[in-house]
Image (cartoon, rainbow, N blue to C red):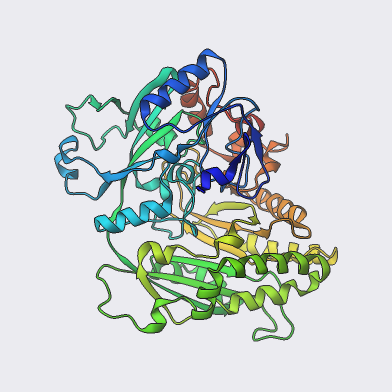
Amino acid sequence: MSRFDRNFKNGVWQNTIKKHSIRTDHYFKPTNHDEIAEIILRAERENKTVRAVGSGHSFSNVALIHEHNFLILPEKLNKVRKVAQLTLKEKYQEAPFVWVQSGVTVKSLNNELTNLGYSITNMGGINHQTISGAISTGTHGTGVNVPAIHGMIRAIQIVTHGGQKLQVERTKGISKKSLIYNGDFKIIRDDDTFHAMMVSLGAFGIIYAYILRVEHEYWLKERNYILPWAEVKPLLASRELLNKFRGVKLLINPYILTKGKSPNDHTCLISTYEIEYSKPLAKKFGDQFRNFIGSILGNLKIVGVMGYASIKKCSSKHPDKMPRLIETAMRNLQDKGYRDTAHKVLFQGGEYIKERAYDCEVAFDYKDDNYITVIDELIKNAAILKNNNLYHNSPIGIRYVKRSKASIAPEFGREVVYVDTPMVLDSNGEVEIIESCLKLMLEHGGIPHWGKFNKLLIRDEYDTDQIHPGLKKWRNLMRIYNPNGTFTSLFMEEMKIT
């Protein structure tokens, strides 16, 4: 059974964590752009909404529509190939460009790139999302000089209002100037339109394919080690740690254990990523795994099932044990180094648990140290919640992302630090803890991730246009390609961004 079929049963589609679902009388599995155009034209004739849904990884209701409208499942749009050189400007003809259809999963893309001698530039910690779903909601990895996934886009092939087939590029795009069409797709060269469509929330039409600029194959070395939070903070403030590596990721225990290796401080797990452009001639046995036992067990479904059940039970019956559980999990992730081809290192594993998590993730400006203050405030907030017998059951996560020109990406116009506060799905205090963390981070000027928990933004006290500086231009362009609301989701209506 495909991931698409797992999420869609008996006329009802639901996201992976089953928080959001929608019933539809009409769902389609197109095999080409002509079929997509026919679906859109039918939707417009019948005054229906039509949306494409991917793997359902987003925690928000970003993909949902009103009941009894049209859904597109892009599972048959699953091809990857090199871009034909004859369509490209001369300076791009030797570049590692690939044409990727919208239903391709990140996992499948990585396998195809390996066969072509290429590597993905960046990705999130899991790989079951469709490339279009990951891009359209702003999925990212880590590295202050490394773009989010949408940073790989060089052209977008989209079927939009009236069944128009467009290939959207930057004003100084990749296609030869003499080229008006690429196949059936009319080429639109416009920076503003391109930047608006990069992270689109599906609002401009149905994505058919992307042209991505990936990398020639490269390798990464990851190292995971523990330091007290007090020692980490000056390393972050000085940028010493962050400038030394291609990428850095942090996990912080929001609790102090009185009996432990750091009895007076919070434990911080630091993950660093160094790039290697030549394949290691020989790998030590230990280099083949992050942590031998943790790596093997963490990717066994039965272990994930047991772990998920144990955390839920423990958070309900013995919530005071959560600090120790977090500490043990973090210390078990320590290792001496892990080397492999890039996508295998960027993939973090533990999919079963990650598909049963719920969290908010909020971006802060990297240029100042406000995010360090925010982390300290989240730690204080955890202590307040603890007094009400509400405990985090996962560490606070920190990742870094390069600035982007995508109009509504949280990293629009600036390097950012993403702070996330995950909770195991349906565990004790799950929603209360996430809401309190999101509220705190919004008060400190953070911008929420579109695909995570962001329900607070529908309240009158929050002005989405003020939070997202590029939203006004994005909305104006979106209305050109979506004049009748054919591609508008419930999420967009709730967020007042239609």
Q: Nearer the viewer, residue 375 or 293?
A: 293
Which corner quadrant of the image does residue 321 belong to?
bottom right
Q: Is residue 120 visible?
A: no
For residue 162, above or below residue 281:
above
Residue 462 pos. (x, y %): 68, 38
477 vs 61, left or right, is left
Which corner quadrant of the image does residue 35 belong to?
top left
Q: Is residue 440 visible?
A: yes
The furthest residue to the top: 45
Question: In percent of the image, x 49 and y 60: which residue is there?
Answer: 125
Q: Give the number of marks.
A: 0
For residue 384, above or below residue 134:
below
Question: In percent of the image, x 57 and y 65: which residue is there?
Answer: 301
158 vs 301, left or right, is left
The furthest residue to the right: 388
Q: Nearer the viewer, residue 370 or 276?
A: 276
Residue 495 pos. (x, y %): 64, 34
Question: In percent of the image, x 35 and y 84: which residue is there?
Answer: 284
Residue 313 pos. (x, y %): 77, 66
Question: In percent of the image, x 59 and y 61: which residue is there?
Answer: 352
398 vs 308, left or right, is left
Q: Nearer the viewer, residue 318 or 449?
A: 318
Q: Nearer the viewer, residue 409 or 391?
A: 391
Residue 409 pos. (x, y %): 49, 43
* Image quarter (top left, top right, bottom left or bottom right) of the C terminus: top right
Which corner quadrant of the image does residue 333 belong to?
bottom right
For residue 132, above or below residue 250:
above
